[in-house]
Image (tube, rainbow, N blue to C red):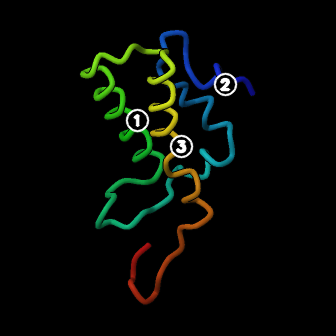
Amino acid sequence: MKFKEIFNEDWSVNWDFLLTISPFSKMVNLEQNKEWHKEDCWTHTRLVTQVMEKILSINGIEKGSEEWIMCIMAAICHDLGKADTTKWSVEKNDW
């Protein structure tokens, strides 16, 4: 895998490519604690990344710059471990 494959030519995230990577594909339909996240983990990750893109744009951070790439990658990867750590709690009756 090449890092550049994560992004399209216009620096938008190549979500289809990310789904070919196991830790990301495991996020699809992965339920989360409804108090904090109404959506599945994959949808949540995409929403967080969209918000990060807006924040960077508002602050004049250029797409493709080192700072932009680091911040977008942080948003994309922030929940990577959830698929392996999210478990149903009988005690809490929640994830």
Measured Cα–Cα span from mark 1 to mark 3: 9 Å
Q: Which residue is mark 2?
A: 3
Position of 3 relative to 87 (above/below)? above
Q: Residues within 10 Å of mark 1 (few under 14, many from 20)?
A: many
Q: Residue furthest right?
A: 1
Sequence order check, earlier mark of 1 and 2: 2
Image position of 73 (left or right of 36): right
Q: Residue furthest front?
A: 67
Sequence order check, earlier mark of 2 and 3: 2
* Front in this rendered view, residue 67 or 3: 67
Report the number of numbered marks: 3
Q: Which residue is mark 3?
A: 77
Residue at image point 61% right, 38% down: 19
Measured Cα–Cα span from mark 2 to mark 3: 13 Å
Mark 1 and 3 residues: CB-CB less than 8 Å, in contact?
A: no
- Which quadrant: the C terminus? bottom left
Residue at image point 29% right, 67% down: 35
* Front in this rendered view, residue 65 or 73: 65
For the residue labelled by badge 1, is the local secondary structure a helix, a strand or a loop?
helix
Image position of 62 (left or right of 57): right
Give the quarter of the image for residue 45.
top left
Query: What amino acid type is highlighted by mark number 1?
Result: Thr
Residue at image point 30% right, 20% down: 57
Query: What amino acid type is highlighted by mark number 3?
Result: Cys
Give the quarter of the image for residue 53.
top left
Q: Which residue is mark 1?
A: 49
